[in-house]
Amino acid sequence: MQQPAPIPNNIVLIGFMGCGKSTISRELRRLLGYPLVDMDAIIEQRAGKPIARIFEEDGERVFRDMESGLLGELAAAEQPAQIIATGGGVVIRPENRAVLEHIGYVVWLCAPPEVIFNRTRNSHERPLLHAEDPLTRISQLLTQREPWYRQCAHLSVDTAGLSSREIATGILESARYFFTGHHSSPCRKP
C-alpha cells in the first residue's frame, strides 16, 4: 500500500476579510522565520493594481482565476515551509478547497460579523463590502463561506479579543503537534 505524500510544513491562513490573516501571518513569520506569502499582495503586484481595481475593471472572475492559479503554483512549489496568507474568498471554488487540504496546516481565522465590520468599515479597498448595508453583506458572505472554511481547516481560531501574539503562539503549538504526526487524518475538522 502506497503511503500518502507528506503534507508540506506550510502554515496556511484562511478566513474572511478583517479576521487577521495579514497581521497573524506577519507575527508567525517573526516567530518562525519562515518566508511569508501574501496571496493578495502577489496578485496585486502581478496585476499592477489593487484588488479593488481588479474587481472594478476586470471583474471578480478574473481575480478568482488569478487566485486559483497562484494557489496551484504554491501547491506545486518546492518550498517546504512557509506562511501562506490567502484571500478571504479562496474557499469559494471547490478546486481551491481540494488544494488547501493538502498544501499544509490550514488555520481558519474567524470573528463575529460585528467585529469584522468594525475592523473593515473604514477601508475602501474591500470591493465586496461596497454595499448599502455592509454588516448585512458580511453576515451573508460569512453564512455562505463558513461550511467551506470549516471543510478546509485543521484548526479554527476566533481572533476577537486575542492579541496577535496569543493567536500566533496557539497556532504554532497546534501546528507542531500536527506536523509531528499526532493527528488522526490529513484534515481534522474543527
Image: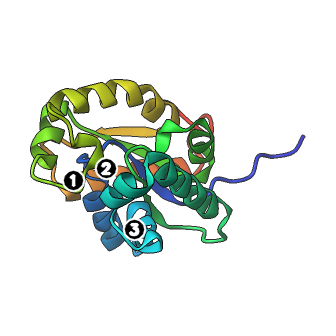
Taking the image as shown, residue 32 lies to the left or right of residue 178, namely left
The answer to whether marks 1 and 2 mark residues whose Cβ atoms lie closer than 8 Å is: yes
**On the image, numbered disc 1 is attached to which residue?**
166
Taking the image as shown, residue 90 lies to the left or right of residue 99, namely left
Q: For marks 2 and 3, give the one nearer the viewer.
A: 3
Question: Which residue occupies 23% across, 41% down?
Answer: 129
Quadrant in the picture for residue 158 = top left
Image quarter of the N terminus: top right
**On the image, numbered disc 3 is attached to which residue?**
44
Picture coordinates of residue 165, whole percent (x, y): 21, 59
Image quarter of the C terminus: top left
Taking the image as shown, residue 67 lies to the left or right of residue 145, namely right
Give the secondary structure at mark 1.
helix
Res 35 seen here: no
Give how far apart the Cα atoms at labels 3 and 1 are. 30 Å
Binning the other alpha carbons within 10 Å of mark 1 as few (below 14), some (14 to 19) or many (20 upward) gives few
Q: Amino acid at mark 2?
A: Gly
Give how far apart the Cα atoms at labels 2 and 3 are. 30 Å
Q: Amino acid at mark 3?
A: Glu
Picture coordinates of residue 117, whole percent (x, y): 14, 39
Q: Is residue 27 or residue 46 the one in the foreground?
A: 46
Taking the image as shown, residue 165 lies to the left or right of residue 183, namely left
**On the image, numbered disc 2 is attached to which residue?**
170
Q: For marks 3 and 1, give the one nearer the viewer.
A: 3
Q: Is residue 157 above or below residue 124?
A: above
Give the secondary structure at mark 3.
helix
Q: Closer to the N terminus: mark 3 or mark 1?
A: 3
Q: Amino acid at mark 1?
A: Glu
Counting labels gives 3
